[in-house]
Image: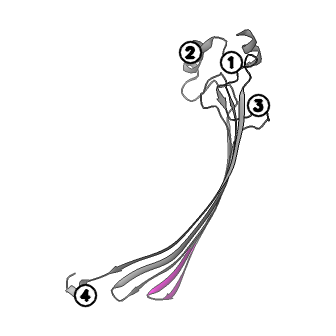
Amino acid sequence: WAAYLAANPKANPGGMAAVLARQQQLGFWAVDSAVSSFHREHDMLVTNTTSYEVNPDATVKNIFGYSKSYSHDEVTETGTPYLIESTDNRNSGAVGNVATIKNVSDELQLQGKAQALTYIFGLYYLKTDSNTFYPQTYFDLAPVIPPTTTTSHWTTDDTSKAIFAQGTYDVGSLTHLE
């Protein structure tokens, strides 16, 4: 135990009973953790909606969207001063989960009315690219047992396309009912 405490200075030497007492002392919003915790995020969002009236009964509308999100977080999901799991890789030196997500969307619509028919036709496009980097360390019991480490890194690219239409026909003129 002395060797473990010497190698892990943030560990509570009083064991789990002392950890629970310390957590009660800290209160609900604070955590006595084996790793430092941080969250950094940058987000950008751009939208544009443009409409052009072709005539009193027809409008062309375009809705464009762009977003980019970057986040970098280091946490431990256990909230204890013992390193059971953390978002760093002690062997490689990588610190914190990093996620970058970019979206581009565009929707082109034709809206209008032709006598008793109200309609909308359109095309839709969405492209999403994401890059995720998750370094991890598990069960650091050094110097007795070295931690297990891994880093997961993946990308995802998704594209969605759609053609849509919707119409409403007012049958009141045919049935003479309002």
Q: Earlier in the sequence, mark 2 or mark 3?
A: 2
Q: Residue at x 54, y 27 (%)?
A: 28
Mark 1 — residue?
Answer: 11
Residue for point 71% across, 36% down: 150
Residue 139 vertical placement versus 104 (above, below): above
Marks 3/1: CA distance? 17 Å
Numbered label attached to residue 173: 4
Q: Find disc 2 in the rendering and name its residue.
A: 21
**Residue carrying label 3:** 90
Does the magenta-highlighted stretch encompass residue 26? no
Q: Specify whether 45 is left or right of 28.
A: right
Q: Position of residue 12 (x, y in %)?
A: 66, 16
Marks 1/2 in contact by CB < 8 Å: the verdict is no
Label 1 near label 4: C-beta < 8 Å?
A: no
In magenta, the rendered stretch is 49-62
Q: Secondary structure at mark 1?
A: loop
Q: Quadrant of the N terminus?
A: top right
Q: Amino acid at mark 4?
A: Ser
Residue type of the residue flagged with mark 3: Arg
N-terminal of the pair, mark 1 or mark 2, is: 1
Magenta residues: mostly which secondary structure? strand
Q: CA distance from mark 2 to mark 4?
A: 77 Å
Q: Nearer the viewer, residue 36 or 166?
A: 166
Q: Are the residues at dot 3 and dot 1 in contact (C-beta closer than 8 Å)?
A: no
Element type at marker 2? helix
Which is more N-terminal, label 4 or label 3? 3
Picture quadrant of residue 146: top right
Q: CA distance from mark 3 to mark 4?
A: 75 Å
